[in-house]
Amino acid sequence: MMLTVRQLCRLSQKKSLCSCTARLFDPGNVVRQHHWNKGQNQLVLNANGTNFHYFKKAACRQYNKDVGTKADLVKAIGYRCEWRHNYTAHDAILYALGVGVSTTQSDYLKFLFEKDDNFCVLPSYGFIPAQKEVLLLTLEGRLPGLANLDPAKVLHGEQYMEVFRPMLRAATLRNECVVVDVIDKRSGALILFDVNTYDDKDTLITYNQFSIFIVGFGGFGGKKTSNHEKPTIKPPARPAEYSVSQATSIDQAALYRLSGDYNPLHFNPTVAARVGFSKPILHGLCTLAYGIRHVLQQYANNDVAKFKAVKVRFSKPVYPGQTINTNMWRDGNRVYFQCEVTETKDVVISGAYVDFHHID
């Protein structure tokens, strides 16, 4: 039977239970064999038939006590913080290279050459100023209930961003963040961060919602849905109007991380292995930026002023070196899109759309 460690520990403490065998699909995507032997007072965890770990019954009681602290996550609702982000044209160019802009493009100068008359910043750069404290709050376990959190358990579930003014070529920005909700997804907890980004004149530039999934932190009895959550939308049930494919570099994650996302999951093979990946995966926001670029090129001729908003779900990871294929469907000023890996046909970004102010 399939049980979580929490369920198995609870069963092990029932007087009527002499032994129990179960299989667990753990946060590392490794199927483990668990066996409780009441006579030996031990919980045996067998990982792929090789590594065994033994826990006394008291350890199970402590495990249940620790799991109970997950409920403290709801205390994070309403948490607020603020920080500043400075960037220059150099940072914008480094970011553009990190998300696949190439000198093979006919209009590469507008994104890669700061002296070009039409130089501009990709709208997806709006993720970067807003993400800093969100990453620290989760990866470093600063929120209630996340003390001593393994960074490998932090996954990016969904993303929404609305751009109110195109990003300037250089700016000092102020970010205001609030945890608007925590959702119990059973297999984990989904934390919703709303981040408003302002320029030095207090003009609103972007609004971001980060949906961060904490693996293994569900089951605390919290709400299952939230009115704050920006919904994803399935694409139309018709063939895509356009498809664009672009290969990523084997060093794409190494380059992209220089824009500020230093989660070791994307660079350290040991950390990637703990989550069940054969090697480090590409940042979700990097994959998303590829999709946004493809849509922006196809429907707005790379006019960043036309971009309004984007919403996506990160369905599966991309490995650096794989090819991203973006399928697109237009409906008025909204373009639905879906990204898949050409080599595997896996859908990696789903329920996605880009809203434009207008499409010619």
Image: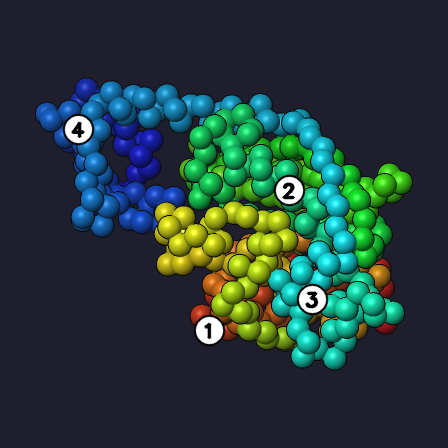
Measuring from the top left, give residue 18's x and y in whole percent: 14, 27
- Distance of label 4 from label 3 (alpha carbons): 54 Å
Q: Residue at x 58, y 34 (%)?
A: 137
Q: Nearer the viewer, mark 3 or mark 2?
A: 2
Circle 1 residue? 343
The reply to whether the C-beta atoms of the residues labelled 3 and 2 are less than 8 Å apart is no
- Distance of label 1 from label 4 (alpha carbons): 45 Å
- Distance of label 3 from label 1 (alpha carbons): 20 Å
Give amino acid for label 4. Answer: Gln
Give amino acid for label 1. Answer: Glu
Between discs 4 and 3, the one toward the N terminus:
4
- Distance of label 4 from label 2 (alpha carbons): 43 Å
Q: Nearer the viewer, residue 67 or 289?
A: 289
Q: Nearer the viewer, mark 4 or mark 2?
A: 2
Which corner quadrant of the image does residue 305 belong to? bottom right
Residue 345, above or below 67: below
Between discs 4 and 2, the one toward the N terminus:
4
Q: Residue at x 71, y 62 (%)?
A: 93
Between discs 1 and 4, the one toward the N terminus:
4
Measuring from the top left, give residue 34's x and y in whole percent: 22, 39
Give amino acid for label 2. Answer: Lys
Circle 2 residue? 132
Circle 4 residue? 42
* Quadrant position of the N terminus in the picture: top left
The reply to whether the C-beta atoms of the residues labelled 2 and 1 are less than 8 Å apart is no
Circle 3 residue? 293
Measuring from the top left, give residue 89's x and y in whole percent: 77, 58
